[in-house]
Amino acid sequence: MQAERKPTGEELRRIEEEANAVIREGAEVLEFEMEKEEAEKHFGDAIYDLFPVPNEVSLLRIVRIPDWNVNCCGEKHVENTSEIGEIRLEGIRFRNNKQLLEISFRLLNQ
């Protein structure tokens, strides 16, 4: 999918299906701490989402779903994806400064 265009309805449907398939399979959610420099060397910018980490922070909590997602986060997470329940995509936004397609969703079982 080219980053310069909005995804089609069919592409969004497939994204939602694949995300829900990972949720249903109960993929393990790994959570660990790493020094910021080591995490950046190992994962690159993939660990950063929408918010910058202050320069004075040296230890990061990394949350990883193997073969699916990795991010740093300050919050506690589930032990496996099946605890989340089904999701529905709610909207999309292209963040030009990061060349990032942001997809928002809502939890259906909450």
Image: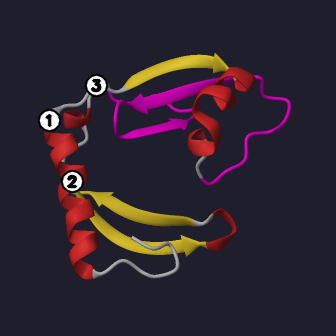
Tell me how far mark 3 sits from mark 2, CA to CA: 16 Å
Q: Position of residue 19 (x, y in %)?
A: 25, 51
Amino acid tagged 3: Glu
Tell me how far mark 1 sits from mark 3, CA to CA: 9 Å
For the residue pair 37 and 85, the one nearer the viewer reads as 37
Amino acid tagged 1: Glu
Q: Is residue 85 left or right of residue 94?
A: left
For the residue pair 74 and 34, the one nearer the viewer reads as 34
For the residue pair 98 and 77, the one nearer the viewer reads as 98
Dot 3 lies on which element? Answer: loop
Residue 18, disc:
2
Name the residue at the front extreme: 2
Dot 1 lies on which element? Answer: helix
**Which residue is at 60% across, 66% downward?**
99
* Structural crowding at the residue carrying mark 2, measured as other residues with C-alpha within 10 Å and reported as few (<14), some (14–19) or many (≥20): few
Q: Confirm whether residue 109 shows in the render.
A: no
**Which residue is at 24% across, 30% downward?**
27
